[in-house]
Amino acid sequence: MTVRISKPEFNLREKISELDKPSGVKGNELLRSETTQEARDIIGAGRKNMVINGQMFINQRNSTSSYTIPHGTGGSYGGPDRWAVNDATDGSVSVNMDGDPYGGNGAGSEVQEFARAFQIACAGTSGGLSSSHNVHFFQIIEGYNIIPLGWGTPGAKSATLSFWVRSNVYGTYCVGLENENTNRCCIREYELKPGFKWQKVVLTFPPCPDGTWNTVHGVGIRLRFALASGSQFADGIDGKWVNSDELTTGNQVNFMSSTNNRFFITGVQLEVGKNATEFEHRNFADELALCQRYYFETTDAKGTVYSHASATTNVGLGVAFPVRMRATPSVTLPTSVSNNVHNFGAGDNSYTSGGQYGSNPDGGNIYMASGTSRISGTFSVLNTNAPVKFDAEF
């Protein structure tokens, strides 16, 4: 006689997840993942941070020196690479790359996994903000790098922003994501508490299934941190997408109230999904190469020397970029060329002016004028205080 015994089906993953085991929150999430990609997202496998230089340790323009941001709209660079600052107030702000987390201010805090921070200082007050006044710092994320979000499609995903921050100006701050056309914007609020201590902030942005989101080499997302704002840009709704250009929800503190005010930030990460994973520490060489796609400067303009056809007193130089730039860059020569260019095999250093022509994303062509024409040679060395600058920022 044959006896058949049947048991109801059960899900092994669910049963394992019910066991009393020290798997932790991430372990439970991993067990419940339904696809390989979902598991990879949870553990943070592969390159995940859409922000470049989020650990603030690349500053090609000014190293650790302070830089005062010019007034105006559009933003100016001068602090850590890829981070621009917009100061449209009656006051002024200065920026620099600071060693704060690794020093005494970060002692005893997990923020010490970072050696550098971006510091913004109020250098001149603007106590009364008009409707259009604002101060914010931002990074423009290239369209290619936001493709996994799927924004503008029915399959749009959430995004999570995490960062470490401290300031002696307490209260509500706002940070937002915006598209290139400035007609899709989502603001999130966060609160800085008294004590001037480092705090970790984690904010999730809901999916944006509509609107136009660039997914090529132009503006993909504007990530904007507000420090002060007038009423013109203060109609955002915390955690909601709106069809207008906003910086805050109207609850933003005024960072420009005193020249004693300081704001520090580091460890900025924007990733796909509803969870903040551990910060993606890229090595210095990789991070520098990512930054050089947008800005590159050199005091050692190595390249083939060739004759510049327009004059017999000019010499041309070809400069190969270390990485392909986002677009054909603008080229800025040293303010004073005289005595900054030399060693064409004959010690020439009498060039007093210069210009640029024929650049592309892979290399730049420059010429020096009013000196000795050369049709051969191997390189030109520029003085360390006179770099040639190639800029392909947005």
Image (tube, grey):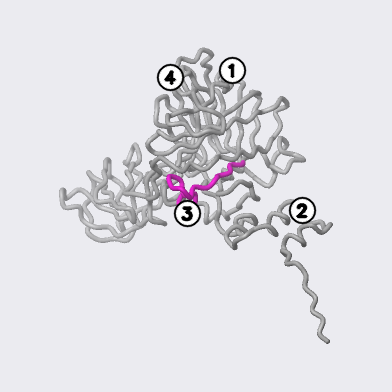
* Image location of residue 239, percent across then percent down: 56, 33
SS for tag 3? helix
Q: Give the alpha-carbon distance from disc 4 to disc 2, as whole Å.
A: 48 Å
**Could you tell whether 355 is left or right of 192 in the image?**
left
- In the picture, which quadrant includes the N terminus? bottom right
Q: Give the alpha-carbon distance from disc 3 to disc 4, as whole Å.
A: 36 Å
Q: Give the alpha-carbon distance from disc 1 to disc 2, as whole Å.
A: 45 Å
**Could you tell whether 18 is left or right of 73 in the image?**
right
* Chain part drawn in magenta: 146-162
- State the residue at coordinates (48%, 44%): 60
Q: Which residue is mark 3?
A: 289
Whether residue 54 is visible here, answered yes or no, is no
Residue 284 or 210: which is nearer the viewer? 210
SS for tag 1? loop
Q: Which residue is mark 2?
A: 24
**Could you tell whether 38 is left or right of 391 in the image?**
right
Q: Earlier in the sequence, mark 1 or mark 2?
A: 2
Q: Give the alpha-carbon distance from disc 2 to disc 3, as whole Å.
A: 36 Å
Q: Which residue is mark 4?
A: 132
Residue 50: which numbered mark, if any? none
Q: Residues within 10 Å of mark 4 (few under 14, many from 20)?
A: few
* Image location of residue 269, percent across then percent down: 58, 45
Query: Between tags 1 and 4, which lies in front?
Result: 4
Residue 262 or 344: which is nearer the viewer? 262
Q: Which residue extends farthest bottom?
A: 1
